[in-house]
Image (tube, helix red, strand yellow):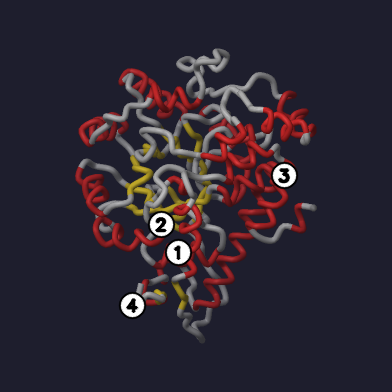
């Protein structure tokens, strides 16, 4: 299968599956428990219908937007995700370059495999730091200071991952970092030697944001250990308020699913929230991000920017979320599968397809700018206007 034969999310997913060892493909593709929320994230968009207007003279469409103080040429962005070098040897470097080409945001995770500084050198566009809150408060302050020094514009604190989700696909293969695969997992790696060649040519596996704090060479210090031992499950609103003051800039909470939490985030000075259930990877059975979006926009959208991610696979999905009041929409697996399939070229093709899909959908809706999208253009099959 060739990259030019990929025309949608499912094509990229199939291509990635052919190229990745099974344990790594399932790390991207999998979710928590029975994966109900994972499936619901995309299915929710199908319960919402578009009501287009015609004869509006839509010769040109402007897809630009401003969110979290950043001007984007596209209203969707590459959500920060962990461990990208496992998916393709260029990892976050490829994503940063692709995002820069298309004028949109990208992010580096605390568990990223490229440093904040290197990503900043690749792209001068808007950069997010996806931050995890540690028991060691001095470590938190040190990492925020490093991000500020690197020129990161948006601090994005993940608040739905104080413990790891129950990802049973990973348990079946023994997937872990460092690798401690069972027999089934080892055999799947052996079947994809080209992945291994590219991976090992890049030298030792690194987590640059954490390498002074997590020794990946010790068997006892794994990613699961990081979540269970280093992250602080007692994190509360007072802790976050202190971080907001220390950062003194664009500060966004990722993983907000209730209107009450969105209002609380606004009250402590957050400038944004991401309506997100972590791609269904944390609490299975939680509500889909899209289903919860309108409630959170109504509750706090006049006080902070509301973003969302989860299940986005089409330009029409982005359009529906923007119509409900999202200022921008994050994509994760949508760019990770093409990253795995073809590196930077794959990510660029995915962003280009999404751009074309959204532009086409805007024209067919009779809208020339993001500002013209309204809830009135939607109908939910359960009844009611958006």
**Residue at 50% of width from left, 26% of height from top?**
223
Q: Which residue is mark 3?
A: 342
Camera-side residue: 152 or 344?
Answer: 344
Horizontally, residue 176 falls left or right of residue 45, namely right
Camera-side residue: 136 or 73?
Answer: 136
Horizontally, residue 82 falls left or right of residue 161, namely right
SS for tag 4? loop
Rendering quarter of residue 322: bottom left
The disc, 1 or 4, on the residue closer to the chain's N-terminal end is 1
Regarding residue 272, the answer to whether it shows in the image is yes
Q: CA distance from mark 3 to mark 2?
A: 30 Å
Position of residue 109 relative to residue 378, above or below, is above
Q: CA distance from mark 2 to mark 4?
A: 18 Å
Q: Which residue is mark 1?
A: 44
- Badge 4 local density, few (<14 within 10 Å), some, or many (20+)? few
Regarding residue 92, the answer to whether it shows in the image is no
Horizontally, residue 76 falls left or right of residue 265, namely right
Check if mark 1's residue and mark 2's residue have beta carbons within 8 Å: yes
Q: CA distance from mark 1 to mark 4?
A: 15 Å
Disc number lying in front (3 or 2): 2
Q: Which residue is mark 2?
A: 288
Q: Quadrant of the C terminus?
A: bottom left
**Residue at 26% of width from left, 58% of height from top?**
302
Residue 339 on image: x %, y %: 65, 44
Camera-side residue: 304 or 332?
Answer: 332
Position of residue 286 relative to residue 139, above or below, is below
- Badge 3 local density, few (<14 within 10 Å), some, or many (20+)? many
The disc, 3 or 2, on the residue closer to the chain's N-terminal end is 2
Q: Which residue is mark 4?
A: 384
Q: CA distance from mark 3 to mark 4?
A: 42 Å
- Badge 2 local density, few (<14 within 10 Å), some, or many (20+)? many
Q: CA distance from mark 1 to mark 2?
A: 7 Å
């Amino acid at each position: 299968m060739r990259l030019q034969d990929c025309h949608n999310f499912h094509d990229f997913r199939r291509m990635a599956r052919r190229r990745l060892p099974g344990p790594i493909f399932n790390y991207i593709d999998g979710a928590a428990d029975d994966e109900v929320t994972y499936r619901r994230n995309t299915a929710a968009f199908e319960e919402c219908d578009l009501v287009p207007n015609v004869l509006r003279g839509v010769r040109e469409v402007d897809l630009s937007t401003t969110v979290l103080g950043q001007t984007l040429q596209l209203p969707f962005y590459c959500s920060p995700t962990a461990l990208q070098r496992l998916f393709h040897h260029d990892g976050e470097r490829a994503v940063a370059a692709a995002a820069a080409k298309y004028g949109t945001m990208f992010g580096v995770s605390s568990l990223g495999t490229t440093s904040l500084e290197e990503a900043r050198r690749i792209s001068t566009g808007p950069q997010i730091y996806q931050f995890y809150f540690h028991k060691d408060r001095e470590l938190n302050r040190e990492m925020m200071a490093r991000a500020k020094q690197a020129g990161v514009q948006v601090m994005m604190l993940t608040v739905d991952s104080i413990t790891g989700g129950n990802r049973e696909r990973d348990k079946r293969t023994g997937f872990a970092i460092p690798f401690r695969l069972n027999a089934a997992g080892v055999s799947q790696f052996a079947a994809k030697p080209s992945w291994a060649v590219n991976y090992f040519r890049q030298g030792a596996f690194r987590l640059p944001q954490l390498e002074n704090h997590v020794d990946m060479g010790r068997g006892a210090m794994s990613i699961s250990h990081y979540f269970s031992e280093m992250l602080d499950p007692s994190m509360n609103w007072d802790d976050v308020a202190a971080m907001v003051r220390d950062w003194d800039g664009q500060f966004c909470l990722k993983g907000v699913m209730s209107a009450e939490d969105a209002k609380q985030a606004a009250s402590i000075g957050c400038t944004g929230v991401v309506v997100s259930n972590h791609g269904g990877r944390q609490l299975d059975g939680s509500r889909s991000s899209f289903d919860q979006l309108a409630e959170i926009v109504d509750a706090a959208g006049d006080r902070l920017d509301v973003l969302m991610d989860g299940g986005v696979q089409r330009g029409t999905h982005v359009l529906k979320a923007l119509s409900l009041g999202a200022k921008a929409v994050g994509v994760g697996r949508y760019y990770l599968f093409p990253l795995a399939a073809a590196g930077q070229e794959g990510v660029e093709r995915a962003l280009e397809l999404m751009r074309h899909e959204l532009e086409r959908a805007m024209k067919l809706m009779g809208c020339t700018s993001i500002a013209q999208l309204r809830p009135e253009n939607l109908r939910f099959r359960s009844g009611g206007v958006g």
